[in-house]
Image: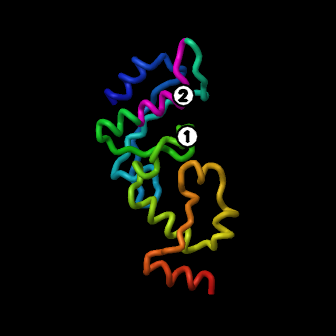
């Protein structure tokens, strides 16, 4: 919280309201509430661009992500919120091997053609549209049963 507020004070002003809430965790592979109890920090307001008086929303959030990574603070982002989704290695930082598991399962359930069909700019930006053909052994049977 100190890092976040410090960034608001040093990078701001920002035209939004900081809110904080606590929610129960989820075991879903790419749940943004992946921790037993997740503290959600939100900057609520409309997206804004930079001008001579303030930083842009994306630049501010990128500064938050950089600071959290530097401090070793594990974090995730709410999938439905504005965020710098193209931040280098973001989904790897947030999910580690769970990202690989998700991509492997998606690749096992969908053919390459269907995976391409069900991809969009967001999946490409977050590097979740990747398709793998060299699946872990336990998923090869799943793929064969889906295609068979």
69 falls in the magenta region: no
- The picture places residue 142, in percent across and down from the top left corner, at 52, 81
**SS assignment at label 1:** loop
Outermost front residue: 134
Outermost bottom residue: 148
Q: Residue at x 32, y 41 (%)?
A: 73
**SS assignment at label 2:** helix
Residue topped by disc 1: 81
Outermost top residue: 53
Q: Residue at x 54, y 50 (%)?
A: 126
Is residue 134 rendered to the left or right of residue 113?
Answer: left
Label disc, if present, on residue 57 of the rendered structure: 2
- The picture places residue 59, in percent across and down from the top left corner, at 51, 28
In the image shown, does 25 or 11 lie closer to the viewer?
Answer: 11
Label disc, if present, on residue 119 of the rendered structure: none
User: In the picture shown, does residue 70 fall above or below 99?
Assistant: above
Is residue 112 rendered to the left or right of residue 141?
Answer: right
Residue numbers of the magenta segment: 53-65
Crowding at label 2, few (<14), some or many (≥20) Cα neighbours within 10 Å? many
User: In the picture shown, does residue 120 fall above or below 39?
Assistant: below
**Rendered-image quadrant of the N terminus:** top left
Foreground: disc 2 or disc 1? 2
- The picture places residue 30, in percent across and down from the top left corner, at 47, 56
Crowding at label 1, few (<14), some or many (≥20) Cα neighbours within 10 Å? few
- The picture places residue 11, in percent across and down from the top left corner, at 44, 20
Q: Residue at x 55, y 80 (%)?
A: 143
């Amino acid at each position: 919280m100190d890092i976040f507020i410090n960034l608001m004070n040093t990078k701001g002003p920002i035209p939004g309201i900081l809110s904080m809430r606590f929610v129960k965790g989820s075991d879903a592979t790419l749940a943004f509430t992946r921790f037993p109890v997740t503290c959600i920090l939100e900057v609520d307001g409309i997206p804004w661009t930079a001008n001579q008086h303030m930083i842009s929303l994306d630049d501010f959030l990128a500064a938050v992500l950089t600071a959290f990574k530097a401090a070793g603070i594990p974090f995730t982002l709410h999938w439905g919120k504005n965020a710098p989704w193209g931040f280098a290695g973001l989904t790897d930082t947030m999910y580690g091997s769970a990202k690989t598991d998700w991509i492997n399962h998606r690749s096992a359930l969908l053919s390459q053609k269907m995976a391409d069909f069900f991809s969009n700019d967001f999946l490409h930006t977050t590097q979740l549209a990747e398709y793998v053909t060299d699946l872990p052994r336990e998923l090869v049977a799943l793929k064969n049963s889906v295609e068979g």
